[in-house]
């Protein structure tokens, strides 16, 4: 035991030193751990700061990159705008040069027109002087003509008296010789009335189908007097057609219209002053028949009404009433009439006009078949040949210039409603075929009625009634 205690006593100091060293090491480890903890905390703080700095730098770099891209885009847009501006400047310069050339040309044309106007003014002054002298001569001629017209009326009255005496003598001779006086009297009276009816000459046609030029051709003859749209077909139904011109009766209304149209100076508007009095259109026509071989009216039909009745209804009654008169019907392709109407009357109802055109064509062709005194004029055949045909058939002398009827009328297609367009094209084709059959490419005034032509006209009428749904 003593030995043990002795060893323990010997070992105790080293053990205490070891424990002291252990404690020292423990304190050092604890200090190091504390120091490491501080270092770790500091590191984390610094790392957080560096991360924030890195994020800030990254955001700033991205902002700088975005700004750089935007700057590049702006510069590119500016460059593009600059290029476009340069191109516009070039085009403006070219346009300016072109405008300058056009301006120079226009200045040249204006100078030429000024010179032309000056020459035209000089010509107009010459014509005014000539017109003044011709008017004076015309007044003198009218005065002389008035005297001769009075003498002519007296002579005509004497002739009529002689005709009556001759008729009475013929009747007396017929009674004493054959016993058939009534038959001879009726025959003579019928022929006389027939001849008087044939002296009534009316030009009938749809608007824009050649009625005016046909009237001009006939009115160029001193033996013909055709009114320019007196509208006899409407006057018979309603005597107040001229009411817009003023006046309480037909005579006053007609004279007011005559004065309104006097400045136009065309035959057909100016009625000779020898007509002293009349109260109805028939009296006016009868009075003029004492001075001219043929007297009548130019009637241009349209899609219109007179006192609630359509032009087609009125002209149908007129043609039936004047079936013994000389009737000239003007015809033209429906498409050409519609095109011309659309240009003259932009707001026209194409469907309504198309229906009226078809009804007029049907009426005109039927009248031609049933009246030996009816004739047809196709618009495409209005040329110098028409003048000679009218002179031959009517026995007159026309004094119109050939150049006045030498024009060829052109037309273009327009946008009709689809249904009308198809029917119009089909009717045009059949119309051209009929025209070729009737005129044979040479005849301008159609008055022949062979069996072949009558058959072709009847076929076209049936086709027209079917296509246009005419009742």
Image (cartoon, grey):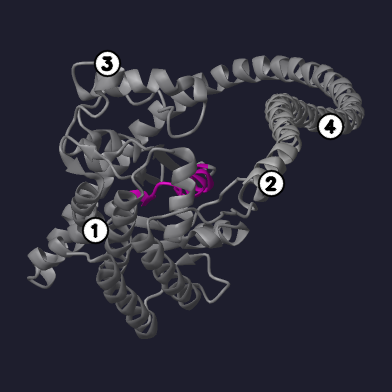
Label 4 or label 2, whichever comes before in sequence order:
2
Q: Is mark 4 on a helix, strand or loop?
A: helix
Extent of the magenta region: 200-219
Q: Where is residue 146 in the image (x, y as percent from the top left)?
A: 44, 23
Residue 3 placement (x, y as % from top left): 69, 46
Q: Would you place residue 434 above or below residue 408 in this image?
A: below
Which marked residue is nearer to the observer: mark 2 or mark 3?
A: 2
Q: How far apart are marks 1 and 3 (CA)?
A: 32 Å
Q: In which quarter of the image is residue 179?
A: bottom left
Residue that carries the numbered disc 4 in the rendered image = 72
Task: Please report whichever mark, 2 or 3, sits nearer to the chain's N-terminal start.
Answer: 2
Left or right? Give the position of 219 relative to 117: left
Query: Label 2 belongs to which residue?
Result: 3
Instruction: State the SS at label 3.
Output: loop
**Which numbered disc covers residue 246?**
3
Q: Is residue 205 magenta?
A: yes
Q: In this view, does 29 lie above or below 258?
A: below
Residue at the (56%, 18%) spot, across then down: 140
Where is residue 401 shown, x and y percent of the image? 65, 46
Task: Tell which tag, 1 or 4, sits nearer the viewer.
Answer: 4
Could you tell whether 349 is left or right of 180 in the image? right
Identify the mark at residue 323; answer none if there is no mark. Answer: 1
* C-alpha separation, residue under disc 1 versus residue under disc 4: 93 Å
Give the mark, 2 or 1, whose residue is nearer the N terminus: 2
Q: Quadrant of residue 139?
A: top right
Rounded to the nearest angstrom, the CA distance separating label 2 from label 3 is 173 Å
Determine whether, in the image, residue 301 is placed left or right of residue 409: left
């Amino acid at each position: 035991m003593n030995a043990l205690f002795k060893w323990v006593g010997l070992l105790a100091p080293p053990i205490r030193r070891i424990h002291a060293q252990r404690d020292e090491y423990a304190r050092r480890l604890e200090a190091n751990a504390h120091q490491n903890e501080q270092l770790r905390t500091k590191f984390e703080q610094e790392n957080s700061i560096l991360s924030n700095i890195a994020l800030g730098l990254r955001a700033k770099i991205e902002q700088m990159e975005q700004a750089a891209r935007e700057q590049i885009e702006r510069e590119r847009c500016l460059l593009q705008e600059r290029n476009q501006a340069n191109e516009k400047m070039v085009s403006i310069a070219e346009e300016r040069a072109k405008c300058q050339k056009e301006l120079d040309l226009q200045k040249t044309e204006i100078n030429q027109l000024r010179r032309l106007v000056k020459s035209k003014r000089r010509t107009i002054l010459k014509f005014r002087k000539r017109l003044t002298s011709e008017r004076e001569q015309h007044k003198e001629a009218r005065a002389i003509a008035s005297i001769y017209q009075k003498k002519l009326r007296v002579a005509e009255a004497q002739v009529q008296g002689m005709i009556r005496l001759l008729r009475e003598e013929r009747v007396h001779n017929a009674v004493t010789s054959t016993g058939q006086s009534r038959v001879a009297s009726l025959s003579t009276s019928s022929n006389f009335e027939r001849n008087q009816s044939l002296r009534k000459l009316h030009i009938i046609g749809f608007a824009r189908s050649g009625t005016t030029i046909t009237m001009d051709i006939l009115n160029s003859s001193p033996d013909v007097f055709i009114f320019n749209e007196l509208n006899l077909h409407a006057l018979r139904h309603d005597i107040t057609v001229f009411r817009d011109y003023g006046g309480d009766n037909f005579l006053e209304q007609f004279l007011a219209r005559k004065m309104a149209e006097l400045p136009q100076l065309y035959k057909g508007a100016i009625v000779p002053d020898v007509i002293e009095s009349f109260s109805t259109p028939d009296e006016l026509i009868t009075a003029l028949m004492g001075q001219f071989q043929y007297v009548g009216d130019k009637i241009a039909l349209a899609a219109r009404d007179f006192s609630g009745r359509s032009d087609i209804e009125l002209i149908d009654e007129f043609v039936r009433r004047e079936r013994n008169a000389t009737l000239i019907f003007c015809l033209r392709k429906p498409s050409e009439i519609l095109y011309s109407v659309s240009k003259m009357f932009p707001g026209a109802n194409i469907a309504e006009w198309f229906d009226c055109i078809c009804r007029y064509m049907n009426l005109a062709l039927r009248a031609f078949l049933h009246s030996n005194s009816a004739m047809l004029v196709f618009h495409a055949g209005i040329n110098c040949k028409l003048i000679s045909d009218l002179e031959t058939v009517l026995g007159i002398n026309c004094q119109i210039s050939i150049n006045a009827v030498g024009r060829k009328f052109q037309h273009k297609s327009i946008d009709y409603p689809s249904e009308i367009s198809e029917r119009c094209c089909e009717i045009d084709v059949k119309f051209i075929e009929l025209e070729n059959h009737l005129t044979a490419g040479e005849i301008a005034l159609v008055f022949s009625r062979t069996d072949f032509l009558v058959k072709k006209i009847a076929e076209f009428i049936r086709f027209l009634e079917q296509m246009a749904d005419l009742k």
